[in-house]
Image (spheres, rainbow, N blue to C red):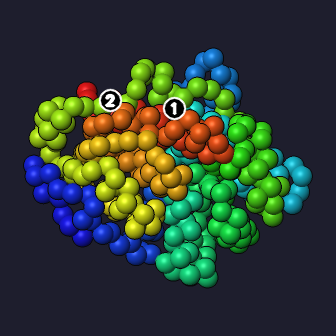
Amino acid sequence: MTTVVPGSPSSLVVRTPTLSGEEIVNHLVPPRQFSSATLDSYRPDRDYPSQGAAVAAIRNFVAAFTAKGGGLFSRRREKAEVRPGVYLDGGFGVGKTHLLAALWHAAPGRKYFGTFIEYTALVGALGYAPTVSLLKGASLICIDEFELDDPGDTRLMSRLLSDLVATGSRIAATSNTPPNALGEGRFAAQDFLREIDALSAQFTTIRIDGLDYRRRDLEGHAVTLDEAQFEAAIEGSAVATVDDFDAVIAHLSTVHPSRYVKLIEGIETIGMRGVHPFKSQTDALRFVAFVDRLYDAQVRVFGTGTSLDQVFPEEMLSGGYRKKYLRAVSRLIALTTDAAA
């Protein structure tokens, strides 16, 4: 893999990351921005009481780890108040990932935190039985961005979680709304529980209402620069890459989304020239996955051409992946605003 030299802009598209099963396991921890997330550091919006209620529900879930008596999996009704699974249900930007990371930090024992893509990639790298053997005995498995788009992968993950719950692991998850499901809230929760039908009775749904917290303090569009501003911004970055937007999109098609975390490793700033709206939904969805990893790593983004929050045309925003695109827009506004600052 090509190394980016500090102070010397390189290219993202010359990076060809590999990711072994061992490396995937090492990445199964909360993203850097949530490395110190706690329930106390979560800032609930007072206009939405469900956010405060969610914090209390997570505290109860954590307390179950140290509960004495029959344990979390007791068949007696009086011991079944806290189920072994919890699902955080709500729109983007309400703090689901923060709460999931806070739960991970608070839980005792061996535990794992990863995206749905990372877990399916782990099965692909190691095989199903070795993955179960590796994760077996974990006190907690956290799955962020549980995907409902691919029935095969969804069933694979449902089977994996069923096997792990049977051995005593607790499960916590957030999920993306599936294709053509434009609603939020209970509709999204019902879809999640239906797809993991073998496990659904063991999940408690925690509803989190609210507005995108990134937009509480941000207005307008993602910052776009002219050529002179772009050059100055790149020169001011310690570790940067510069590429044409089309070249980046083409390169993403050659890298599995589970490797995006390695693709951007060590990079502080990514610059893209000639940004323009997407014509291909496949390219757009790949870019969404890429933006998620940029946001996790807090990589600054600079662009010329179309503002990055305008790359998803109206026909895409009105389709089944609306919530994914809007989440990416929100994150791009944050990353470009931080970069400009």
Q: Whole-percent x and y of residue 304?
A: 27, 37
Residue behind mark 2: 223
Total marks shown come to: 2
| Residue depicted at x 16% and y 41% | 234
Amino acid residing under circle 2: Val
SS at badge 2: loop
Amino acid residing under circle 1: Tyr
Mark toward the viewer: 1 or 2: 2
Residue 133: name its quadrant: bottom right
Label whose residue precedes the other's in the sequence (1 or 2): 1
| Quarter that holds the C terminus | top left
Sort mark 2 into few (<14), some (14-19) or many (20+) by Cα contacts within 10 Å.
Answer: many
Label drawn at residue 324: none
The reply, left or right, for residue 50 in relation to residue 258 is right
Residue behind mark 1: 42
Sort mark 1 into few (<14), some (14-19) or many (20+) by Cα contacts within 10 Å.
Answer: some
Whether residue 19 is visible here, answered yes or no, is yes
| Residue depicted at x 21% and y 31% | 226
The reply, left or right, for residue 117 in relation to residue 334 is right
Q: Whole-percent x and y of residue 153?
A: 64, 67
SS at badge 1: loop
- Asked if residue 223 is positioned above or below residue 20 in the image, the reply reads above
Q: Which residue is outermost to the top?
A: 47
